[in-house]
Amino acid sequence: MIKKNFATVILLLFSFFLFAQDKKKDTIIKVDNNYITLSEIVVNNKLDISSFIERVKNDTTFYKAFRNLHIIGYTSLNDIRMLDKKGNIQSSLLSKTKQIRSGNCRKMEVLEQATTGDTYDDEGNFNYYTAQMYSGLFFTRDSVCGEDNIVKGREFSTQGLSGIEKHKEQLKMLFFNPGKKINGLPFISGKTEIFDESMADKYDMDIDLRDFNTISCYVFTIKVKDDKKNGVVINEMTTWFNEKTFEIVARNYSLSYDAGVYDFNVDMEVQMTKVGDLLVPALLRYNGNWKAIFKKREHGVFTATLFDFVR
């Protein structure tokens, strides 16, 4: 019995030693108002953390990747499903489309399409805002000309907009610039600003170095603390930055808020690829449940798979 107890004590001490050694590998530093945990490999890489955080704050590669879709051709598999309260499909759209770029214009051809339920209204417009949002990213009805992929100096703004168009612009801000303040969005404007001093105690942040699809990446993760979940919009966000170029390789994020007059709960996943020197999205997954005043609740799930890019 004594030998057995002694062996148990030794095992516990050894486990504690390994745990303590593992904890020592992480380093916590303070950048501005935020405490950030660095893995041992990041510390050994001597990454300039202050500069890295500034890159995160001011990143435009994510937005530019979607702008790049305006100047190239590609094929897309589109899967849009609207769910009822029980999670059953009440309408759907499955299609294969091809964007053709000619001169300074682009147009879309529908190669295959199948729909169920009330996807469209009598005039051929999408019945659901989720589908409208998808269409705004990947579909065109007519030829669109004179576009570019420039993002410098291009700011999102709700000035002069109202109703659904204003809401679309606000969602673009959440989608393309997560972590920045969104003016004009009632009740939550400052709650998206994750690096602001007022939000500093609400998140755990860490940086690691891992591969994503064979690409070595700095992985920046923010996650709301368990006791702070009621005061934030961004619950969790993980971004993979190419170790060499700092371009965004992938991003997953979870957003939610209940403001009474509206609420939403959205999870998104985006994966990028390169077409020559252009960064473009190759996969986008969305699972969102939202309700706005005077509108029916929508629960939409969609997946966009892009391939056969042509410059």
Image (cartoon, rainbow, N blue to C red):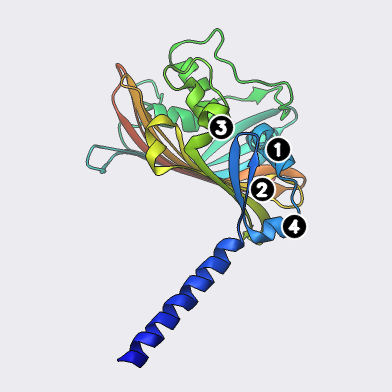
Determine whether label 2 and label 1 are within 8 Å by CB.
yes
Q: Which residue is mark 2?
A: 241
In the foreground, 49 or 30: 30
In space, the residues marked 2 and 4 are separated at their CA atoms by 15 Å
Q: Earlier in the sequence, mark 3 or mark 4?
A: 4
Instruction: Check disc 3 and report the residue beneath it.
Output: 179
| Name of the residue lying farthest toward the left | 86
39 to 229, vertically: above or below:
below
Residue 304: which disc? none
Of labels 3 and 2, earlier in sequence is 3
3D distance between C-alphas at marks 4 and 1: 17 Å
Q: Which badge, 2 or 1, is on the more N-terminal residue?
A: 1
Locate the N terminus and report the quarter of the image it occupies: bottom left
The residue under label 1 is 55
Q: Amino acid at mark 3?
A: Gly
Q: Amino acid at mark 2?
A: Phe
Q: Quadrant of residue 94?
A: top left
Real-space Cα distance between discs 2 and 1? 10 Å
Which quadrant is the C terminus positioned in?
Answer: top right
Q: Looking at the image, do the residues carrying marks 4 and 1 touch, with CB atoms under 8 Å apart?
A: no
Q: Is residue 306 left or right of residue 233?
A: right
User: Looking at the picture, how far across and down is residue 26, in whole percent?
Assistant: 60, 58
**Dot 4 or dot 1, earlier in sequence:** 4
Pointer 1 and pointer 3: residues touching (CB < 8 Å)?
A: no
Residue at the front extreme of this rendering: 2
Rate crowding at label 2 as few (under 14), some (14 to 19) or many (20 or more) other CA atoms within 10 Å: many
Measure the C-alpha gap from mark 1 to mark 3.
Answer: 12 Å
Q: Secondary structure at mark 2?
A: strand
Look at the image and tell me whether residue 260 can be seen.
Answer: yes
Query: Considering only order in the chain, which callout, 3 or 1, is on the residue closer to the N terminus?
Result: 1
Can you identify the residue that label 4 sits on?
45
Between the residue at mark 3 and the residue at mark 4, the CA separation in whole angstroms equals 26 Å
